[in-house]
Image (cartoon, coloured by chain):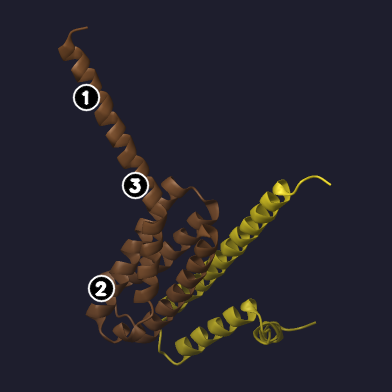
Chain colours: A brown, B yellow
């Protein structure tokens, strides 16, 4: 083996090692990232005053759905906890329905319905956060 | 034998989680009756209540699992008598 080949092999091994460390680092950080997404939905759903304006309600609905989808999609592959997946899947379905309704520009969305949705989403995130905090303890 | 109204009234009077869900569902129906929400929105909100209940059930199961694991680990660390 020439010194050049040896250096190349060592270089590749070092690169693979660094990638592995990065991957493990990302995976371990996942729990807190998922938690942050749920916390974000929890905070947004607290302010149902945004339901009075369609634009602000749509923006909030969109953010909540995107965060819920993120938490569910990554959670089911990385975390692989059956109950957590079930909870985030339901949360995603609840937020998606609201987002879909606002997306249809020709459909009227009542403020009462929007506030009820926010309340449901808030209760759902509260339950998920309570149990996930217990899990991390 | 109880009629449907009595069955619903019976559930609504319960002070637990089930009673709370039924009371919320009833409030949604009343809002739909007043024309504050459409029939379509009512159906979506009712479905959400079922999803919320499923979230609660999954949380209860996970709670149970965590409690069992904690107890089981504690048991394993106690020396044999």
Q: Position of residue A126 (x, y in %)?
A: 48, 72
Towards the viewer: B66 or A52: B66
Q: Are marks 2 and 3 in contact (CB under 8 Å)?
A: no
Residue identified by numbered label 1: A11
Q: Position of residue B67 (x, y in %)?
A: 65, 59
Mark whose residue sits in front, 2 or 1: 1
First in residue order: circle 2 vs circle 1: 1
Q: Residues within 10 Å of mark 1 (few under 14, many from 20)?
A: few
Residue in view at x 58 percent, y 85 percent: B23
Q: Are marks 1 and 3 on the same chain?
A: yes
Q: Chain of mark 1?
A: A
Q: Would residue A100 be seen by someone viewing this image from the given angle?
A: no
Residue in view at x 48 percent, y 70 percent: A124
Q: Position of residue A65 (x, y in %)?
A: 34, 65
Q: Are marks 1 and 3 in contact (CB under 8 Å)?
A: no
First in residue order: circle 1 vs circle 3: 1
Q: CA distance from mark 2 to mark 3?
A: 29 Å
Q: Residues within 10 Å of mark 2 (few under 14, many from 20)?
A: some
- Please, what secondary structure does the residue beneath circle 3 have? helix
Residue identified by numbered label 2: A59
Q: Chain of mark 3?
A: A
Q: CA distance from mark 2 to mark 1?
A: 47 Å
Q: Chain of mark 2?
A: A
Q: Is residue A82 above or below residue B39?
A: above
Residue identified by numbered label 3: A26
Residue in view at x 39 percent, y 68 percent: A39
Q: Is residue A124 above or below residue B6?
A: above
Towards the viewer: A14 or A27: A14
Residue in view at x 29 percent, y 68 percent: A62
In the displayed structure, does residue B65 sit left or right of residue A79?
right
């Amino acid at each position: 083996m020439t010194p050049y080949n040896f250096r190349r092999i060592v270089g590749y091994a070092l690169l693979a090692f660094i990638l592995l460390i990065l991957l493990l680092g990302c995976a371990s950080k996942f729990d807190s990232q998922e938690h942050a997404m749920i916390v974000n939905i929890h905070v947004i759903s607290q302010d149902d005053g945004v339901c009075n304006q369609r634009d602000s309600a749509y923006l909030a609905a969109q953010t909540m759905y995107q965060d819920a989808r993120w938490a569910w999609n990554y959670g089911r592959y990385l975390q692989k906890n059956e109950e957590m997946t079930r909870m985030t899947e339901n949360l995603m379905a609840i937020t998606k329905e609201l987002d879909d309704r606002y997306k249809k520009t020709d459909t009227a969305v009542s403020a009462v319905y929007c506030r009820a949705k926010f309340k449901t989403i808030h209760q759902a995130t509260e339950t998920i956060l309570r149990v996930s905090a217990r899990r991390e303890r | 034998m109880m009629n449907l109204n009595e069955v619903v009234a019976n559930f609504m009077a319960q002070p637990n989680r089930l009673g709370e869900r039924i009371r919320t569902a009833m409030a949604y129906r009343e809002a739909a009756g007043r024309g504050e929400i459409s029939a379509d929105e009512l159906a979506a909100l009712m479905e959400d209540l079922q999803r919320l209940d499923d979230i609660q059930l999954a949380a209860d199961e996970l709670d149970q699992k965590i409690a069992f694991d904690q107890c089981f680990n504690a048991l394993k660390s106690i020396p044999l008598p």
